[in-house]
Structures are given as C-alpha cells and as structure tokens.
C-alpha cells in the first residue's frame, strides 16, 4: 500500500505589524456594581412576574395588563445586557 504524502504547506502566521493594539482600558476589570445590578434586575424581573401571576393579574400595575410581562422580562433581558459587559 503506498504511503500518503506529507503536507508541504507552511502554517500561516499573521504579520506582526498588522496585529490590533490592545489598550490598557480594555484590560480593566469590571466595576463592583455591575454584577450586583445584574442580579438585582434578575430578582426584580422574576419577582414582578411571580407577583403578576399569583395576584390573578391585578398587581403590580393592573392597568398595564400584559405589559407587566414586558416589564418582568425586560428587567431580565437588561440584566443579560449588563452581564455581557462583565469581565
């Protein structure tokens, strides 16, 4: 059985003068309030939805009707946006 040929192509290495410069500002750790705010938003969002369903759609704001769902899920989505900035 014939032996397969060895690959002769060199491994690509990008040129060193084109590499993006890493700034010191991008290496900073996230502020302490960031994860705390995200956790608070998650808890508020879940609490808002639980209160809305357990109160037979009368609380937190009865006149908003199903917009209460948007508030609860909006808080949780906002926390995901905040957590995407966490390092």
Image: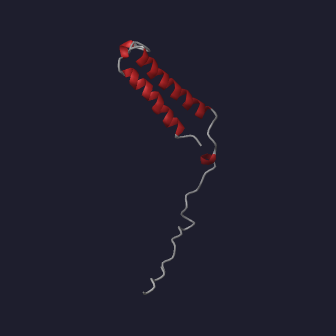
Q: Nearer the viewer, residue 22 or 41?
A: 41
Q: Position of residue 86 (x, y in %)?
A: 57, 40
Give the vertical position of 46 relative to 82 (above or below).
above
Residue 19, by quadrant, is: bottom right
What residue is at 53 percent from the left and 63 percent from the top? Answer: 18
How many numbered discs sit on the rendered protein?
A: 0
What residue is at 54 percent from the left and 68 percent from the top? Answer: 15
Furthest toward the front, the residue is 1
Quadrant where the C terminus is found in the figure: top right
Give the vertical position of 1 relative to 78 (above or below).
below
Q: How is the image coloured?
A: secondary structure
What residue is at 45 percent from the left and 85 percent from the top? Answer: 3
Quadrant where the N terminus is found in the figure: bottom left
Q: Position of residue 16 (x, y in %)?
A: 57, 66
Give the vertical position of 81 relative to 40 (above or below).
below
What residue is at 63 percent from the left and 36 percent from the top? Answer: 31
Q: Position of residue 24 (x, y in %)?
A: 64, 49
Q: Nearer the viewer, residue 20 or 44?
A: 44
User: In the shown orientation, is residue 41 left or right of residue 70?
Assistant: right
Furthest toward the bottom, the residue is 2
User: In the shown orientation, is residue 45 left or right of residue 57?
Assistant: right
């Amino acid at each position: 059985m014939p032996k397969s040929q060895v690959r002769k192509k060199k491994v690509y290495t990008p040129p060193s003068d084109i590499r993006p410069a890493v700034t010191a500002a991008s290496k900073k750790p996230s502020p302490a309030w960031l994860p705390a705010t995200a956790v608070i938003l998650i808890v508020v969002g879940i609490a808002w939805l639980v209160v809305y369903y357990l109160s037979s759609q009368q609380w937190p704001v009865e006149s908003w009707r199903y917009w209460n769902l948007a508030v609860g899920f909006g808080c949780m989505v906002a926390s995901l946006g905040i957590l995407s900035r966490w390092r």
